Image (cartoon, grey):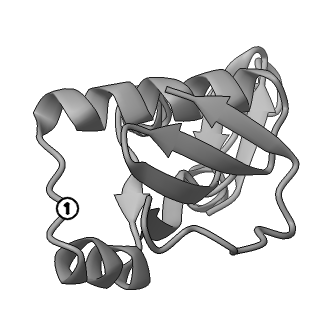
Amino acid sequence: MSYRVINGKIYSFGDFESQSVNSKNRTISNNTKTNAENSFESILKKEVQKKDNFVISNHAAERLKERNISLNESDMLLINEAINKAQTKGCNQSLLLYKDVVLVASIKNRTIITAVDKDSSKGNVFTNIDSVVLI
């Protein structure tokens, strides 16, 4: 969906084209303003919530399940904090070391790509990572 900013207010492109614009005052009807503000609020909420969660890929979930590794809520919070720290440093792909588990994460997509336990990680080479976060 596309958006336009008019007089410091954000409007979705569909709402902008469907509403008539008064050429003298360059104002848009109140219904459009309300819709635009609601859509802006929903977009803002989505962006804020992104920093509160991450996704575990199917591959990583299978790996965790195969090796009987379970992550509780406090583990998830610590991993999320590590992803947030890596994101603030500008990282793209990170290796997260947490307890006896190695997690490879796409920081940009906020996704855990794969998981390896301590015993299986011996002798492995991890490529295409630009950072390591110790949790």
In which quadrant of the rendered view does residue 132 lie? top right
**Viewer-side residue, 91 vs 17:** 91
Q: Position of residue 30 (x, y in %)?
A: 42, 26
x 59%, y 28%: residue: 134
Query: For the residue labelled by badge 1, is the local secondary structure a helix, a strand or a loop?
Result: loop
Kindly tell me whether residue 59 is visible in this rendering.
yes
- Viewer-proximal residue among 33 and 55: 55
Residue 64 vs residue 17: left or right? left
Q: Residues within 10 Å of mark 1 (few under 14, many from 20)?
A: some
- Describe residue 62's horizontal placement relative to residue 121 as left or right: left
Q: Locate residue 106, reporting x and y percent.
A: 65, 58
**Relative to residue 82, is residue 100 depicted above or below?**
below
**Can you tell which quarter of the image residue 122 is in?**
bottom right
Return the residue at label 1.
69
Q: Residue 6's quadrant in the figure?
A: top right
| Viewer-closest of 51 and 72 | 72
Q: Position of residue 75 (x, y in %)?
A: 24, 34
Position of the N terminus by quadrant: bottom right
Which residue: 11% across, 41% down?
A: 72
**Which residue does the image show at 69% across and 40% down from the upper left?**
21
Please give the name of the residue rendered at 82% of the width and 57% of the height, measured from the top-left corner: 129
Residue 63 picture location, percent across and down: 33, 79
The amino acid at mark 1 is Ile
